[in-house]
Image: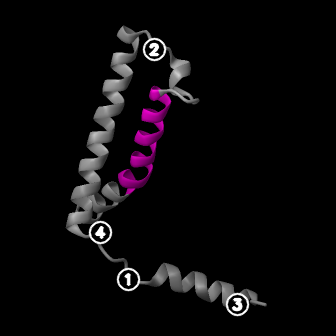
Amino acid sequence: MTTRSELLENTGRGTCVRHRPVPETLARRCGIATLIATLVLLIAVLSAEPLGIDQEAFSGGWQAPALIAAMVEGVLIVAGPIWVLAVAQRA
């Protein structure tokens, strides 16, 4: 059983460690992936109206727009924060 002092010590240890910068190659790849995913999302949304695709198609189900939205969301959730962190560390 962990005691309260052990929990506080571990929390303090986690916040006091030296932060490592994001490697340049990882930052570059995440930036490229984020920009490409944003472009794909923009193209999908702008081409939906001329193709007759309504907003419901992007919200889920077994349709291509829902698959595109899920893939773009996954890339943005994973790669976006890493890229932002790398930019903030280099600033």
Tell me where residue 56 appears, x and y as whole percent.
56, 20
Who comes first in sequence, dot 2 or dot 3? 3
Report the amino acid beneath label 3: Ser
Mark 4 in CB contact with mark 3 (< 8 angstroms): no
Front residue of 28 and 62: 62
- SS for callout 4: loop
Check contact, mark 2 vs mark 1: CB within 8 A. no
Residue 77: numbered disc: none
- Disc 3 marks which residue? 5
| Residue 52 percent location from the top left of the image | 43, 9
Question: How far apart are the two marked residues, 2 and 3, measured between alpha carbons?
Answer: 57 Å
| Quadrant in the picture for residue 91 | bottom left
**Mark 2: which amino acid?**
Ile
Q: Which residue is mark 2?
A: 53
Label 1 and label 4: CA atoms lie apart by 13 Å
Mark positioned earlier in the residue sequence (4 or 3): 3
Please tell me whether mark 1 sits on a helix, a strand or a loop: loop
Quadrant where the N terminus sits is: bottom right
- Counting from the top left corner in percent of width and height, residue 41 is at 36, 31
> Identity of the amino acid at label 4?
Val
**Does residue 6 appear left or right of residue 20 in this picture?**
right
Of residue 49 and residue 83, the one placed in the foreground of this image is 49
Q: Where is mark 4, residue-wise?
A: 22
